[in-house]
Amino acid sequence: MQHLANLNELRGQAGEIAIKVEGLSHVYPGADGGVPALADIDMSVGKGRFVVIVGPSGCGKTSLLMMMAGLRRQSQGRILCLGQPIPEPDPQRVGVVFQEASLFPWLSTLDNIEFPLSLRGMPRAERRRRSQAMLSLVGLEGFGERYPHELSGGMKQRVSIARGLVQDPPVLLMDEPFAALDEQTRMTMGHELLRIWSTARKTVVFVTHSLTEAVYLADEVLVMSPRPGRLIDHIEVGLPRPRTYEMMATEVFGKLRNRIWQQIRKTV
Amino acid sequence: MTRLQIILTRLALLALVLGAWELLPRSGVVNPLLLPPLSEVMAMLANLLGRPNVHEAVAVTALEVLVAFIIAVPLGAAAGILLAENEYFGEIFKPMLFYVFSIPKSIFLPMFILVFGIGFQQKVAYAAFTTAFVVLMSATAAVESVRSDHIMVARSYGASRTQILWRVYVPSMLPILLETLRISMIFNFTGVMIAEMYASRTGIGHLISNWGENFQMPQLFAGVIMLSAVAILFNEAVRALEARCSTWRT
């Protein structure tokens, strides 16, 4: 209960906004005026919150996340990350975890985690100290010298999370990070992520198409419609933390899950 | 089979072939005029390695191979990377190059002779021409082997263009580039040999072709052994390097 209290305290500052999206629309250029991908997105993510965006495949949720990361430009509207626009990637503010772990196969686990630091030219000793700390945070002590092809899918995603956190950015954006994992690993990883989140205290925006994952992880769930993606529902998940697997069997959990499903079903 | 068994079996097969090479011509099963016994060929090889005209031929051929390689590899690689990276160039030139690639290059040899004569330049030009195509094709494949999600990761962590080149492109492409180096050398060597055997006054290919025409089989086979040794040595050296640089490629 100790860290529950801490988290609530953190949310006490919830007046502060980490990410604000205003009037965002996006059209992929092409013949006939292009393909509309995102329409009229307005949202804000409070500091320290765990927000999950859920929606059907191809609804533009990944595009939205990439725009928050400064990796893609929107056609209209603006995104403020910690009060400032983010026209290009800024690893000091935002860490990104991708769908495939996307580790560099020619680098060892520790070198992969250190990659963002080495781009900044941080001295090797300092880099090692930080990457070792991240390695234990994600529970992979002893695997530092292994190469990605020697790791399981779940372990790779842990490394990828460690890489996302190594610069200690206040915001972590996660694009369906567990989509490629099997069901059991996926559940364990979700649980692990919540543990890491409660230690590292980041603002997390997490994209998924799994309804169970959404309810299990989130403080808030944002539901998106099929293309062009719009936000069609905003759900506060009132479940207490730390979350347990038992909660998934509760009525509250089922109702929340069902509400999201109904929203998505209406639009498909 | 264990590793040792495999190696022993390979050695046994090699011994069998070499033994047959020695015994079949000696026993008269195979005409020794067409296939001289191995011992005779090896004695001839030792003899040839002491002859000044062979030294000269080897030096000429080695220089041709080297110069053609030095011209063809950067040229082919640059063109291949340009083709893969620049959408515009790719669209225009890719189909044409694929058409040309399918044509046997040796049919252009008479044109090379008309333009360059039958000396050093013609050998280099022809070998570089055949090799550049192979390098070009492989370099294109090397660029295309760079995964876009890796570039995305590097960008998301604030990598500059130069950093992306050195930290993502180069390590991604290295295994294929080394493979290219190895395979292009095979084509390059072949190019020089064909040009030398077709029309030439010197070079090891010229000697081999002469020995063949004059029915000097021990010399011919000694030449073949010499060339094979050099080619295999180069190939294996690059392959060892390749294996070291691509342990992650599974």
Image (tube, coloured by chain):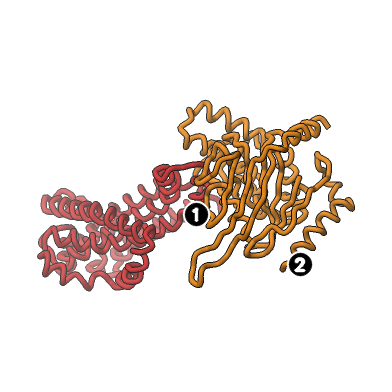
Chain colours: A orange, B red
Residue at 26% from the left image edge and 66% from the top image edge: B35
- Mark 1 Cα-neighbour bin, 10 Å: few <14, some 14–19, many ≥20: few
Residue at 46% from the left image edge and 53% from the top image edge: B146
Residue nearer the viewer, A262 or B11? A262
> Chain letter of disc 2?
A
- Mark 2 Cα-neighbour bin, 10 Å: few <14, some 14–19, many ≥20: few
| Amino acid type at mark 1 | Ser
Q: Is residue B149 above or below residue A32?
A: above
**Residue carrying label 1:** B148
Left or right relative to A229: residue B36 = left
Residue lying furthest top in this view? A125
Q: Please state, as top left, top right, bottom left or bottom right, where the N terminus of chain B lies in the image.
A: bottom right
Residue at 37% from the left image edge and 67% from the top image edge: B91
Q: Is residue A111 above or below residue A229?
A: above
- Asked which quadrant contains residue A80, the reply is top right
| Amino acid type at mark 2 | Lys
Left or right relative to B218: residue A50 = right
**Residue carrying label 2:** A266
C-beta proximity under 8 Å, tags 1 and 2: no
Dot label at residue A74 = none
Would you say residue A213 is visible in this rendering? no
